[in-house]
Image: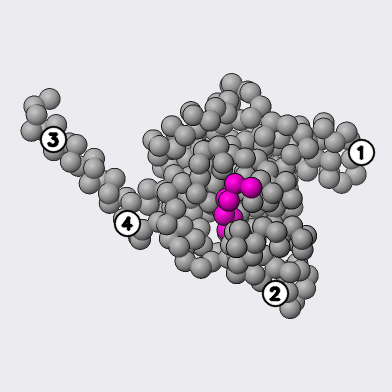
Amino acid sequence: MPRGKGLKVATKIVKKAEDRRTRGGTPVYRRIVLKLSGESLSGPDDFGIHASTIQSISREVKTVHDLGVEIAVIVGGGNIFRGARQHGLTIDRATGDYMGMLATVLNGLALQDALEKVGCHTRLMSAIEMHQVAEPFIRRRAARHLEKQRVVIFAAGTGNPYFSTDTAAALRAMEIKAQVILKATRVDGIYDADPEKVANATMFERITYLDVLQKGLSVMDSTAISLCMDNKMPIVVFNMNVPGNLKRVVLGERIGSTVTAA
């Protein structure tokens, strides 16, 4: 390739990358972990994967990805199997947890397909090795995928029973050096009571890790909160059902509730 032509091609690539970073605003986070519950994929249904819901989530992720943000997603499996909490089924805790991990792989495959259909190059990485459907989780490989602007989906939790996908989100966030964990929910943030049951529940705009633990608030499980507290990993809890909220959080708007050290 002639030198002049090569320079023009390189210039176009750089300009395209810059346009993608600046389109629609400047993100305050360079690398994020997005935590999705399995139930969020079932939409209005009680079970399974709701087509229009997972498509909507994928479009929201694509909008943020187009800003140049590196995105890792942790997905739960409660829409398929809830481990030891499965109603009407008496099962060993460890066995139930492994079944729940496999459910997250199913959700990961569905989300990967939906993301790639909207134009996001995606890699599914599993903490339980299953080479035919997902890459094994390797920290440095995951980081390299993110650097190449691929969305990375972490499935199968930590690969160990007795640990939730919340804990997996905290662990993976530390490992890939993310700047924040974004916990997607169906309410506006963290409340002192369940806002779907208590009409006058009060929302916290900012709250500390210790307050979350002491008040027993349903944000993430105590292991995940403690891990975030020990490593000073901020958590933003927001309503994913409001279109555009994910982008607003990434752009630094005061959306939802923020959990920090102080």
Instruction: Choose between 233 and 67: the one closer to the eye.
Output: 233
Q: How is the model colour-coded?
A: one colour
- Of the numbered discs 4 and 3, the one sitting upstream in the chain is 3
Q: CA distance from mark 2 to mark 1?
A: 37 Å
Kindly identify the residue that appears in the image at 72 percent across and 46 percent down. Answer: 223
Q: CA distance from mark 1 to mark 4?
A: 52 Å
Kindly identify the residue that appears in the image at 82 percent across and 31 percent down. Answer: 95
Q: Are marks 4 and 3 in contact (CB under 8 Å)?
A: no
In the picture, the disc for residue 186 is: none
Describe residue 37's horizontal placement relative to residue 13 as left or right. Answer: right
Report which residue position mark 1 lands on.
90
- Of the numbered discs 4 and 2, the one sitting upstream in the chain is 4
Q: Nearer the viewer, mark 2 or mark 1?
A: 2
Q: Nearer the viewer, mark 1 or mark 3?
A: 3
Q: CA distance from mark 4 to mark 3?
A: 24 Å
Q: CA distance from mark 1 to mark 3?
A: 65 Å
Does the segment drawn in magenta span residue 61? no
Amino acid residing under circle 1: Thr
In the picture, the disc for residue 7 is: 3
* Quadrant placement of the N terminus: top left
Report which residue position mark 4 lands on.
23
Instruction: Tell me if I can see residue 147 in this picture.
Output: yes
